[in-house]
């Protein structure tokens, strides 16, 4: 199995297109940082007094807590925010500036938006290309079980995605240090007992992990479509449709109970670190459970199709 994985990895990185995608990611992340810097410069007309802003947020949070229909998880999240806001006002601890170095490092979720586009291309073609190039017969004629071959390809795709995420994160850190000033504020969190300073690096990596879930799910879907239909273009098209249109579908179906069980609702886990909610009453643990079911279905279809397929087809 290890040798198969190494072969798939070497095959993947021997292609010129793979290096082009890595270079394109560097350009896109650097461009995103530059755009953020430009926006910050355009909006540099004086920061609102942070105490006024925090007081407004505290008042709004307390109003939300007055809603008796809040689910337990949402109430706990708001109570944690309330404690942090009260601590800031009582101890004069300012939040991080919007366009500061630390805030840019923590806000690493945008990297996943670029990585998912590139990973889908690889996932869609890693099996389909074997059929289109006519190498599938030679590949499956080896004395190696088919499930091992498919597993090696699947792992190679996801390692590729992980590496792109890390490359994007490193580039974003470099750009943050070059383009943005350090903040005089501090990130705070409630740890269940008291308000403490949060690690900027830990938060950045955590957001990176959450955004990779979207990459992993979308790539697995593309991998399934490419394996079943042997068409990379179809796999890329359907995967990007899911990625770009998913939120629209969720908004349309938001008032129906079924929205809690469709994959689009749960692909972006970074929403659990924000105040934005399209569907109320859904927790991260529930989202992970739903995604696990869909991933299992995608993989079962991929393996069953690949194992049983006639290599002459």
Image (spheres, grey):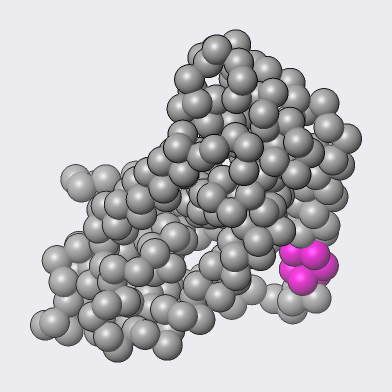
Answer whether residue 170 is magenta in the image. Answer: no
Q: Judge left or right: residue 127 versus residue 83.
A: right
- Counting from the top left corner in percent of width and height, residue 152 is at 55, 25
- Counting from the top left corner in percent of width and height, residue 255 is at 30, 88
**Snapshot quadrant of residue 34:** bottom right
- Counting from the top left corner in percent of width and height, residue 24 is at 83, 48
**The C terminus lies in which quarter of the figure?**
top right
Depth check: 148 or 163 in front? 148
Depth check: 309 or 158 in front? 309
Which residue of the protein is positioned furthest toward the front in this rendering?
Answer: 312
Do we see residue 28 in this rendering? yes
Q: In the rendered structure, which segment of residues is drawn in magenta?
A: 35-41
- Counting from the top left corner in percent of width and height, residue 89 is at 37, 65
Q: Judge left or right: residue 250 versus residue 132.
A: left
Q: Is residue 40 above or below residue 103?
A: below
**Snapshot quadrant of residue 73:** bottom left
Do we see residue 202 in this rendering? no
Q: Residue at x 60, y 11 (%)?
A: 3
Q: Judge left or right: residue 166 versus residue 52.
A: right
């Amino acid at each position: 199995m290890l040798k198969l994985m190494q072969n798939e990895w070497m095959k993947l990185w021997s292609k010129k297109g793979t290096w082009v995608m890595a270079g394109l990611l560097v350009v896109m992340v650097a461009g995103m940082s530059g755009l953020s810097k430009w926006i910050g410069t355009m909006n540099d007309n004086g920061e609102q007094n942070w105490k006024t802003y925090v007081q407004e947020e505290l008042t709004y949070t307390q109003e939300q807590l007055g809603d008796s229909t809040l689910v337990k998880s949402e109430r706990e999240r708001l109570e944690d925010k309330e404690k942090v806001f009260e601590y800031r006002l009582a101890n004069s601890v300012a939040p991080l500036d919007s366009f500061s170095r630390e805030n840019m490092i923590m806000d690493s979720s945008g990297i996943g938006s670029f990585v998912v586009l590139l990973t889908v291309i690889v996932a869609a073609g890693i099996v389909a290309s074997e059929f289109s190039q006519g190498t599938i017969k030679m590949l499956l004629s080896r004395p190696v079980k088919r499930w091992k071959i498919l597993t090696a390809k699947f792992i190679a795709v996801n390692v590729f995605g992980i590496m792109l995420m890390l490359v994007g994160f490193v580039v974003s850190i470099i750009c943050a240090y070059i383009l943005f000033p350090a903040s005089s504020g501090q990130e705070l969190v409630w740890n269940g007992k008291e308000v403490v300073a949060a690690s900027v690096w830990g938060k950045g990596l955590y957001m990176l992990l959450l955004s990779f879930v979207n990459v992993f799910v979308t790539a697995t879907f593309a991998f399934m479509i490419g394996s079943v239909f042997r068409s990379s273009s179809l796999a890329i098209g359907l995967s990007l449709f899911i990625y770009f249109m998913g939120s629209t579908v969720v908004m349309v179906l938001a008032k129906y109970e079924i929205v809690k069980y469709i994959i689009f609702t749960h692909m972006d886990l970074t929403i659990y670190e924000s105040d934005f909610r399209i569907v109320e009453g859904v927790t991260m643990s529930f989202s992970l459970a739903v995604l696990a079911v869909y991933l299992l279905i995608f993989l079962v279809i991929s393996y069953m199709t690949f194992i049983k397929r006639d290599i002459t087809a």
